[in-house]
Image (cartoon, helix red, strand yellow):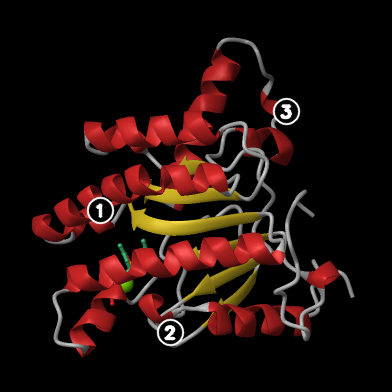
Amino acid sequence: MNQGTCLQDLPVDLKPERLPHHVAVIMDGNGRWAKDRGLPRIMGHRRGVEALKDLLRCCRDWGIEALTAYAFSSENWGRPQEEVNFLMTLFERVLRQELREMMAEDVQIRFAGNLNSLPLSLQAEIKHSMEMTRQNQGIKFTVATNYGGRQEIIQACQAIATQVQKGLLKPEEINEAIFEKYLYTAGISHPDLLIRTSGEMRISNFLLWQIAYSEIYVTETFWPDFNRPEFHRALYAYQQRERRFGKI
Ligand code: IPE
Ligand code: IPE
Ligand code: MG
């Protein structure tokens, strides 16, 4: 348990000793949330940010050690330019605005994805927020931005192949532990629970390696409406599961 976390708000039907250490979320349904209200899609993304801020705080309050959120996939570049631009600007603004709060709440922010092809001003904000929060000891918050699971695995293979080529590593020495060192999520435990909102029963190229044994929870709720009671339901469902990891 993180030092200084306060479990007083944990719902009584949740067992603190059986909480997931790491929760990952595929934040889906912003566009449909907005469409249902006759609003432009970007309003859904705006509200989606609020839902993520609330979830981060809730995880911290309830003693969850890591949260990873899928903010932008490597496939999302295929959306209309206007929406992509809006999202990039939104990420940058939110990062700038939330840094002070993250410092106050001892959040360590990280990013997973191919950051080099993001707008330079966003890259600068990302770098700054990671540097500023590096020493923080509270929740590890990873934002998957321009993230693709297949791409992550390929870049790990390239980096490992380079090590082999330099003679620093033998092919037969490559194992799961070494491979994981080259993933964006190096040093973070695998997600115990993967939540997807908006009812879609797919992974959409998220954390392909890391979710090998994650428990999957799908809710019909659109992301902007995902709140504490919803998260409580997901955690309750998780605690009813029996994780066997291939054993009996
Ligand atoms: C998820 O919501 C946010 C991002 C992918 C950036 P969507 O924008 O995919 O919303 P829907 O799925 O179209 O409703
Ligand atoms: C997954 O949602 C990506 C993010 C939540 C960032 P998408 O809306 O892009 O997924 P698909 O297209 O429905 O698979
Ligand atoms: Mg979607």
Quarter of the view holding residue 36: bottom left
Residue 212 showing in the rendered view = no
Secondary structure under badge 3? helix
Give the alpha-carbon distance from disc 2 to disc 3, as whole Å. 42 Å
Q: CA distance from mark 3 to mark 1?
A: 45 Å
| SS under mark 2 | loop
SS at badge 1: helix
Q: Earlier in the sequence, mark 2 or mark 3?
A: 3
Would you say 93 lies left or right of 86 here?
right
Residue pictured at 78% horizontal, 84% vertical: 12
Which residue in the rendered view is the most extreme toward the top?
A: 166
- Mark closer to the chain start, 1 or 2: 1
Look at mark 1 in the image and give the residue it sits on.
Answer: 90
How far apart are the two marked residues, 1 and 2, measured between alpha carbons?
A: 25 Å
Question: Which quarter shows the C terminus?
Answer: bottom right
Q: Amino acid at mark 3?
A: Glu
Residue at the (22%, 53%) spot, across then down: 77
Nearest to the eye among marks 3 and 1: give it.
1
Label 3 sits on residue: 172
> Where ligand 3 lies, by quadrant?
bottom left
Residue highlighted by disc 2: 199
Q: Is mark 3 within 8 Å of ligand 2?
A: no
Q: Quadrant of residue 187?
A: top right
| x 20%, y 88%: residue | 37
- Looking at the picture, how far across and down is residue 183, in whole percent? 56, 39
Q: Position of residue 233 (x, y in %)?
A: 62, 85
Tag in front: 1 or 2:
1
